[in-house]
Amino acid sequence: MAHLSTDNTALLARVRRLQGQLKAIERALTVGEECSTTLHLVAGVRGAVSGLMDEILQEHLRAHVAHPDLTDAERAEGAKALIDAMRRYSK
């Protein structure tokens, strides 16, 4: 069910920014930064992950649920995968 086979440049850029944000959290914890600063960094990562998840969910929905050329079985499989991912993400 690979659908992210087109140009993933923007998604990869998001992942690289996330890596940088996670490194900033690690640095903050290492140097004993104020907890409020660290909380802001963590909140930023959470928002960035949510944005990445939104983009990938949208692509999945378009390619594996809403695409007009899909069979009913393919749509059902795509919907199940989407529901499973959303359940895991919301925990």
Image: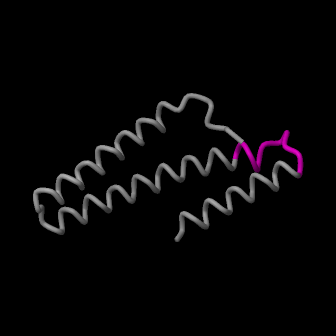
Q: Please check the rendered image and state whether residue 20 is part of the magenta-colored stretch, yes or no.
A: no
Q: Please check the rendered image and state whether residue 66 is part of the magenta-colored stretch, yes or no.
A: yes
Q: In this image, 33 relative to 90: left or right?
A: left
Q: Main secondary structure of the magenta part?
A: loop
Name the residue at 46% across, 56% down: 50
Q: Is residue 9 above or below residue 75?
A: above
Corner quadrant of residue 62 = top right
Q: Residue furthest right?
A: 72
Q: In this image, 9 relative to 80: left or right?
A: left
Q: Residue furthest top?
A: 7
Q: Residue furthest bottom?
A: 91
| Residue 78: x %, y % from top left | 75, 52
Name the residue at 35% across, 55% down: 45
Say which of 54 and 5 sits in front. Answer: 5
| Residue 24: x %, y % from top left | 22, 50
| Residue 30: x %, y % from top left | 15, 57
Name the residue at 84% across, 43% down: 70
Magenta span: 62-72
Q: Is residue 16 above or below residue 21?
A: above
Q: In this image, 18 relative to 28: left or right?
A: right
Name the residue at 62% across, 49% down: 58
Count of marks placed on residues: 0
Q: In this image, 19 relative to 9: left or right?
A: left
Say which of 14 and 91 sits in front. Answer: 91
